[in-house]
Structure formats: C-alpha cells, structure tokens
Amino acid sequence: MQHFRPESLASFAAALLLFAAATTTTTHAHNITHILTKYPEYSTFNHYLTLTHLASEINQRTTITVCAVDNAAMSDLLSKHPSIYTVKNILSLHVLLDYFGAKKLHQITNGTALAATMFQATGTAPGSSGFVNITDLRGGKVGFGADSNNNADNDGAPLTAFFVKSVEEIPYNISVLQISKVLPSVVAEAPTPAPSQQNLTSIMSKHGCKVFADTLVTSSEAINTFSDNVEGGLTVFCPIDDAFKAFLPKFKNLTVTGKASLLEYHGIPVYQSLAMLKSNNGILNTLATDGGNKYDLTVQNDGEKVTLRTKIDTAKITGTLIDEQPLAIYTVDKVLLPRELFKADAPVPAPSPAPEPAAADAPAPPKKHKKKKAADAPADLDSDSPADSPDDAADQSADDNSGGFRFGNERYINVAMVVVCLVFGFQMV
C-alpha cells in the first residue's frame, strides 16, 4: 500500500482542522440565557425570559435584537404585581425581529425606524401596538418607544427609553442591548387571563385550526376532557384546517365513542413546552389512553424538527399557538390516526414477487453458480431479498469482482487516497 509523506500528512491534518473549525462556526447557535448569565445586572430580566419561555423562542430565531433592562428597571415593573402572562407580553415587546447593533442604531435611514417585535408576532397585539419606534437623536442618543393605536398623527411612538450600551453582539445573528427602562404599553400591560381561563377552541380557531376546534365542540365528552385537564397541564396537537377538512369524511364514519377517542388522541395530559419536546424522544400517553386501549404516540425529534409518530402515520409540528404553562397548543400538518381505530386503513406494503418454490426449498448452491443466477435475475428482486441471505453474499461478491467499493476493501482505501491527493495537491511516493 502507498503512503503519504510526513509533510503531506501534516498539511492534510491542518486542512481537516480548518474544515472542522469552519463547520463549528457556521453551526453555532446563540443562547440568550448563557449570554445574560455573564452579566449579573440583568439577572432578573434573564430569569423572567426563562420563566415565560421567551428564552427558548429567542434561541430559535436569527436576526434578532433583545433590549434588556437592569435589575432596578425590572423591580419597578414587578412592583405592580403583573401576572406572569402579562410579564411575557411586556418582555416580548423588548425582543425586536431584526438585527440592531450599536453601529446600526446610529445609521438608521432617515433617522427613525419602526421595528416589529415578538409581541406583534403573537397576533394578540392590535394594529401597530406590537411595534417599537427607534429614533437616532442628536448628540449620539437613541430613543425607543412602544407604538400605540392612539397615535393618530402617525408621527411615531413617544420615546420613553434610551440606548445605554451594547451588551453583546453576534453580527447579523443576535444583538443584546441595554435600554434605560421598561417600555410602557397599555396593550402589553393589560391584564392577561391565565390559559385555564381562556377558551381553548377560540385560540385554535383564530390560528388556523378552526375545523378541528368546531369538531371538538360537537363532542361533549372530548371537549370536557380537554377542559378538565388544562389546570393540571395540557398539550394539544391541533391539525391545520386543510388536513382536518380532508379527513372529515372518514371522521363522520366513526362511532360517537370513536369520534371522541380520535379527538382526545390529539391531547396529552401534561404540559410539554417545545423545548421539552425537542429534548425528549419516546412514547406518550394521550387523553384517549384508558386501560387496555393504549392510544399512545411516539415523539421523535431531529434538531429543530419535531414529529409525532403513530402506528399509522407521522405528523410534523408546524407552529405554536400558545406555550404558557400549564397549556401548550401546537399545529400539526396531519391528523393523528390511532391504530386502535384505523387498523384497516394502515398502509400495506406492496407484496414482494413470490420466490420460485424450488429455489426456496433447495440447499444453497455453490457461490459460482449463485453469482451467475444473480446476474441474470431482474434488478428489482435484489431489494426484496432478505438481509444476509446467500443471494446478498453472492451479489456483494459480484460487486467486488466488478470493481464495486466496499468499506474495509483495500481498493476503496487506495482510490479514496488518490482522490484526496488530487483535491489537496498532495504528493504520494
């Protein structure tokens, strides 16, 4: 076997290190909790970002700006004793859905900009009340103000807070700034009812799940089961309108009990934030689980993608309607079909071609004959043959003799080394 020269090996190793470093840099994700932990003066702000689940939402986004306030400013806010849900609305107004570093603040076109916020993205902020006005003032000062629907003159929101300093910046990814005080907003500060006091079907209907919500209302058993579980913790997987509308003909063929079980199969009797779902793979019981009727489903995740697998189909979480403990409602792209109701509807693989009786019962022939037979056989029979069968061994042997690559084959190693040398310009002796 041929060998690299020592200097070539050193160059090759250096190239690999550079590639690894580049890959690490491009896949790095920010973490607002870790960023603010380094600055104790923002510990209260940091704590409430975690408590309201805003931290996980911030970490999922790029091109974002967090306007942090110090502990004294947070004390002023908390002295009014707002509910945790109102605190979330107020703090979400401090998360801008655009990147504003210290340099960009002083280079705003025409001196002023209106930035959308995470509060506006929730859909609960009417009109322009979810936007923040940023204005570059004379003398290097930059002002911030929460916009208001009462601003009839459309001359920008009053500037009630000012830029203090840049805390940390990852250019065009996340910028953390300190502003002088909490941005006041009548809309954001309005008392927000706890999820248990809200109408579940109303939340679903307003965010693309009206068909499922309307169907849920028609089943007194199912709607009562959902409502009874909110206080102790509830997670709902709500099929989007197009998916459930297409499923309605099958739904109407179910019995009354079957309809209730199908609807209850889309809820689990515990609170699961999106971060919790992303960090846990495994089987979950649903609201339909009862004794011998399993009605369970499996959560699987791959990075930011979370899927729900039943014995019949697989659905993907596509959005978040609400994620406020003890209630979480997510949209999914398919109706979840429990095996207990849809055994007959399960997709059945196409039958494999029946093997010849003689070949199935006869002892395995010598390999040289088997190779000839494999070469003459139709190509699609290979995919249906069992793993580790004599046919597989013969096919693999035939591949080796015809120049096919195999891991562990010396020919593969030699060719791979030649390709690496050609790409990197290494010399071989």
Image: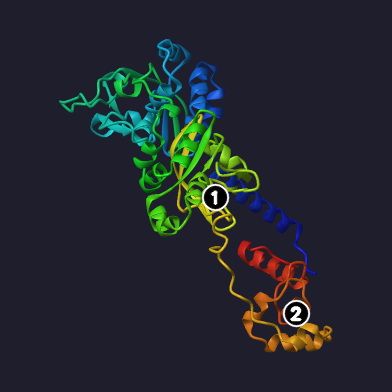
Q: Is residue 103 left or right of residue 415?
A: left
Q: Residue at x 74, y 76 (%)?
A: 392
- Name the spot of residue 178 as percent of width and height, x first: 42, 21
- Name the spot of residue 119 as percent of width and height, x first: 36, 31
> In the image, is residue 424 above or below residue 145?
below
Observer-nearest of 166 and 285: 285
Q: Amino acid at mark 2?
A: Asp
Q: What sort of colour scheme is used for the picture?
A: rainbow
- Pick out the residue farthest to the front: 256
- Name the spot of residue 287 as percent of width and height, x first: 55, 41
In what quadrant of the picture does the C terminus appear? bottom right
Report the disc number at residue 307. Answer: 1
- Quadrant of res 183: top left
Q: Which residue is mark 2?
A: 391
Report the disc number at residue 5. Answer: none
Q: Residue at x 33, y 21 (%)?
A: 190
